[in-house]
């Protein structure tokens, strides 16, 4: 709130993390309703934790969150949430099957994240997953600009919905863009679009001839999907751990789909980044997998106390 | 009977013996089967292949086809002389290639795409250019029919091929970009080029299914005739307005989800990325 010169729109937030006498301080930490940012006190030097929260623990149709983060040289920031981001359905009157062009502009829930990380700095973005409820429409755009020598572990994950109420892939639309630039060169662009098939007029032509396939048919038997992007010197321990694990895998013909599936791919180009994809039948299994896979590599960087706040 | 040039080109391009390297690619089908996610119990034979095909064709059309269309447009513009400079065309193709490379985050798909892209450029250079002896009217005079368009198209493909061959980091030579260049160089329309490309993708998956013994060759023909047509038509129609984003000015983020490429089948991507972990495999992807 110290940055009084910036007028924030609803849902806007700004964070600047800076190293001062071995501690991470926040020259800027501002936010407006419905976004809330909290930074608990941490013993560990050189690291800070910020929780991103929303009032009421969820977002409704039309809510827009836009967070800008600036991680300065040698500062390490861990960004967490408290519980999954729940996205409630679009406002009434919007049919799930309506064509996007006919959708009123205020019905989609939107989250933007713009991050820049200076050399020696690091962002560990390890939130809980996004859960879109029945008929919800959600759009997320995250852009990460890394200087040469910056580090990042960027987790983005989502679940099939409110399974306790029998909702499985019952949202109207989920659209997510993650883009990483290293030294101003685009290194990765990951775009996912999930929507019920057969809702567009053209697909109905197909539907006359072919059996209809739902989003659940396409996503199942898994109900939680995660993507983890890894860049820079401070995640080399995590990368080594994952490389070791993947080398031990040999897939013989399996009889039943595995409970958790994951893959590791190098990102193209000179950046030496990695992308990890995980799918699990249960969210808890994916969470456990992530927590185990990252622990060894990250505890040595951000410390036990901070790591114990992640994946809980 | 006089067959128009485009129809004749379709006959050539849809030849299953065309050396495009597609016979070593299964587009993730082999890995999907190994992970017990292909066969659907208690469904009629062929419906598992059909389900895979729909997911695969849908995500391919939405994520990859826009790059083929844009590369085709660049090639047409250069070949026709509307775009005058060769460097301008090469730079546009290089922007497309770089964006596709950054958007293809699965290393197995990236490898297969580069191998097939390079094969297409070789196919044009060695299989579709006019042999020198067919340019000569008499031993000393050239035929007048060798037109400017063909010259310019040939020059563009040759220059791109050289870059890809050199391992130029600006020219990974991805399949959709090389397909767009080939189809544009041959003078097909953009829509026709996209149509054949998507059809060949679907047929490639069916061929892989036959090699894996998941489907018989007759059943594959039945699917091609009675299901694949609708699937391809549908995917083409619903993605006709999608552009790569590499050549267009910044697209309003409010409309990005309707106008720009996206993956619509994340599970397929994950399974394809696990291909190299299979204990035994017939295909390279």
Image (cartoon, coloured by chain):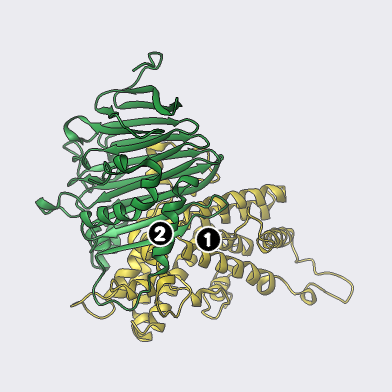
Chain colours: A green, B yellow
Depth check, front residue: A153 or B157: A153
Nearer the observer, disc 1 or disc 2? 2
Residue at image position (37%, 41%) is A302
Residue tagged by mark 2? A242
Disc 2: CA contacts within 10 A as few (<14), some (14-19) or many (>=20): some
Residue at the extreme left of the image, as rendered: A165
Report which residue position mark 1 lands on.
B176
Residue placed farthest to the right in the image? B140
- In the rendered structure, the answer to whether residue A40 lies left or right of residue B195 reads left
Q: Is residue A243 above or below residue A38?
A: below
Residue B95 image point, x, y percent = 59, 48
Q: Is residue B258 visible?
A: no
Give the image location of residue A109, x and y in percent: 27, 37
Write down the quadrant of residue B118 in the picture: bottom right
Depth check: give the residue in front, A139 or A48: A48
Q: Residue at x 35, y 37 (%)?
A: A78
- What residue is drawn where x is 63% and y is 51%? B77
Q: Chain of mark 2?
A: A
């Amino acid at each position: 709130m110290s940055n009084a010169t910036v007028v924030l729109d609803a849902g806007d937030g700004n964070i600047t993390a800076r190293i001062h006498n071995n501690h991470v301080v926040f020259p800027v930490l501002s936010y407006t309703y419905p976004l809330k940012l909290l930074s608990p006190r941490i013993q560990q030097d050189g690291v800070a934790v910020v929780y991103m929260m929303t009032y009421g623990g969820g977002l409704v149709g039309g809510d827009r969150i836009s967070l800008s983060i600036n991680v300065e040289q040698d500062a390490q920031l861990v960004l967490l949430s408290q519980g999954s981001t729940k996205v409630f359905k679009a406002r009434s009157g919007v049919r799930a099957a309506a064509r996007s062009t006919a959708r009123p502009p205020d019905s989609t829930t939107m989250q933007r994240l713009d991050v820049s990380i200076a050399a020696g700095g690091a962002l560990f973005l390890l939130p809980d997953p996004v859960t879109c409820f029945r008929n919800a429409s959600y759009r997320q755009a995250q852009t990460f600009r890394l200087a040469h020598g910056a580090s990042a572990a960027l987790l983005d994950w989502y679940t099939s919905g409110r399974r306790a109420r029998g909702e499985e892939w019952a949202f109207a639309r989920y659209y997510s863009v993650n883009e990483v630039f290293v030294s101003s060169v685009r290194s990765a662009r990951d775009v996912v679009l999930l929507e019920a098939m057969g809702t567009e007029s053209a697909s109905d032509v197909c539907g006359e001839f072919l059996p209809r396939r739902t989003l659940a048919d396409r996503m199942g038997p898994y109900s939680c999907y995660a993507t983890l992007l890894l860049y820079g010197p401070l995640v080399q321990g995590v990368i080594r751990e994952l490389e070791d694990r993947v080398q031990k895998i040999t897939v013989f013909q399996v009889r039943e789909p595995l409970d958790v599936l994951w893959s590791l791919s190098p990102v193209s180009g000179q950046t030496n980044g990695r992308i990890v994809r995980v799918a699990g039948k249960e969210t808890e299994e994916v969470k456990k997998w992530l927590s185990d896979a990252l622990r060894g590599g990250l505890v040595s960087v951000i410390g036990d106390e901070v790591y114990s706040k992640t994946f809980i | 009977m006089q067959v128009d040039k485009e129809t004749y080109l379709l006959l050539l391009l849809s030849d299953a013996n065309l050396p495009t390297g597609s016979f070593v690619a299964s587009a993730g089908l082999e890995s999907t089967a190994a992970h017990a996610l292909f066969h659907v119990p208690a469904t009629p034979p062929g419906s598992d292949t059909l389900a895979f095909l729909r997911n695969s064709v849908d995500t391919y059309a939405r994520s990859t086809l826009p790059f083929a269309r844009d590369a085709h447009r660049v090639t047409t513009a250069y070949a026709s002389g509307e775009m005058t400079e060769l460097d301008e065309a090469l730079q546009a193709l290089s922007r497309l290639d770089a964006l596709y490379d950054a958007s293809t985050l699965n290393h197995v798909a990236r490898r297969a795409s580069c191998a097939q892209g390079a094969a297409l450029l070789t196919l044009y250079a060695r299989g579709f250019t006019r042999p020198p002896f067919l340019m000569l009217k008499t031993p000393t005079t050239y035929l007048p029919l060798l037109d400017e368009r063909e010259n310019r198209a040939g020059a563009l493909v040759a220059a791109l091929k050289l870059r890809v061959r050199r391992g130029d980091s600006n020219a990974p030579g991805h399949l959709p970009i090389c397909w767009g260049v080939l189809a544009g160089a041959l003078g097909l329309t953009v829509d026709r080029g996209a149509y054949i490309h998507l059809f060949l993708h679907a047929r490639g998956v069916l061929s892989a299914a036959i090699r894996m013994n998941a489907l018989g060759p007759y059943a594959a023909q039945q699917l091609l005739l009675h299901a694949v047509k609708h699937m391809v038509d549908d995917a083409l129609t619903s993605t006709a307005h999608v552009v790569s984003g590499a050549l267009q000015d910044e697209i309003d983020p409010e409309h990005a989800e309707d106008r720009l490429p996206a993956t619509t089948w994340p599970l397929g991507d994950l399974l394809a990325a696990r291909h190299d972990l299979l204990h035994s495999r017939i295909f390279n992807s």
